[in-house]
Image (cartoon, helix red, strand yellow):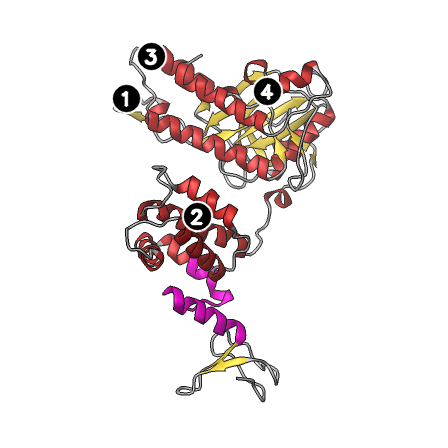
Amino acid sequence: TVLNGAHTCGCCSRASIPRGTKAFACSDCNYELCFECARKALVAHKSGGTVVDSENLLTNVDNLLNDKDALWDNCWRWFNTYDVNKDGYLNFVELSTLCGQLLEDLDVPGIDTCVVEQYMKKYDVDGDERLTPKEFFELFTRLLVKAKSIHAPAGIKREALIGKKIKGSPSVRYTLKEDLGHGSFGAAQRVIDKMTKKSRVMKTISKKEGHSTQAELELEIECMKKMDHPHILRLFEYYEDANNMYLITDICEGGHLLKVIEDAHRSKIRKPMTERWICSVFRQAIDAVAHCHAHGLIHKDIKAENILLMNRAPVTAGKRKKIYEMDPHVVLIDFGLAELFDPSRAFQSKVVAGTPYTMAPEVWASAQNRSKTFGLKCDVYSLGCVLFHILTGK
């Protein structure tokens, strides 16, 4: 129908729809919908879904993701609707139709044949070119998460919360405690925030004796400010006086992954690190590196020494457990050699940096021939070196 006066949509409550606007109305109950809500209602009716307006879409997706039973029921309804030949699988054609409809309902753009092929390859675990209900459930959940990330209101970025460097000593804000170690970078010391009573680490870097230049220090700080991820070391604030730079970060009581590897392979117990523990550590490291790459940063120095464990193993029955006997939480550190780039463009670097035994072949090639470049995959190679190190101790 075409409205001949001011009306209000019965779904999205859009008021005063102008005269002449195309709309839909039910002759039985006189329930009027604007064109957009009517389109969504028709789509939802065909797919067995529910009417979701733009304001409630994010809430509904959140509720689904937080309720595994409802998530599975909703997933199964989609699967059963588009399993046309009822063989208990989704083939490529069925999956293409389903994804197109689901992403349209979720207002997520960008679905095409190539994208569906990628989905099929990624979630077809047994490689039979069709998805089981369990395989589709993983994809279904991933698509909902994607929709949530697109429609979620923009949050405050961590770098906006970390202001410019503070002049003076951090002793005004923090109580100094024991030394945690010394290295080429300077000294690390545990401190207590006087306001929150939380333990932090203060990294003191000498301007005169440190191996890094002022520009390199500023770059490392800028990189840490940009990265907001549970598996990347958090920078809270930083100070500067005449002699030093002071970085206030999370405290990682579990120590370096390198020490854990060395202790594990020296142990008399054969293969003390379980496959489950190794998988968890490596998955977290991969997530951290993927976040760096997605936000315009290449690390260039990934190694076991630059991966820390947040938690210390507890003491039970008077004996401390091994760190690899508890669920790990690792963080990636040391952005001193990192390089920032524009993530919207193809990236190639000529700035050679890293630790020799984890550097990718293309980085070595660039060191020998300056006309050659390397990209983000050098971090992936270094991750492979870390995995080899964990598994073999070498």
Which residue is depicted at the point 39% across and 58% down? Answer: 63
Camera-near label (4 vs 2) is 2
Of residues 1 and 252, the one drawn nearer to the viewer in this rendering: 1
Which badge, 1 or 4, is on the more N-terminal residue?
4
According to the image, label 4 marks what residue?
187
Q: Amino acid at mark 4?
A: Ala
383 with respect to 216 (left or right):
left
Q: Amino acid at mark 1?
A: Gly
Does residue 326 lie above or below 261 as drawn?
Answer: below
Instruction: Assign a secondary structure to mark 4.
Output: strand
Residue 142 marker: 2
Q: How many marks?
A: 4
Which residue is depicted at the point 48% across and 59% down? Answer: 106
Measure how far apart labels 4 and 2 are at the Cα level. Answer: 43 Å
Camera-near label (3 vs 1) is 3
Magenta-highlighted residues: 35-61
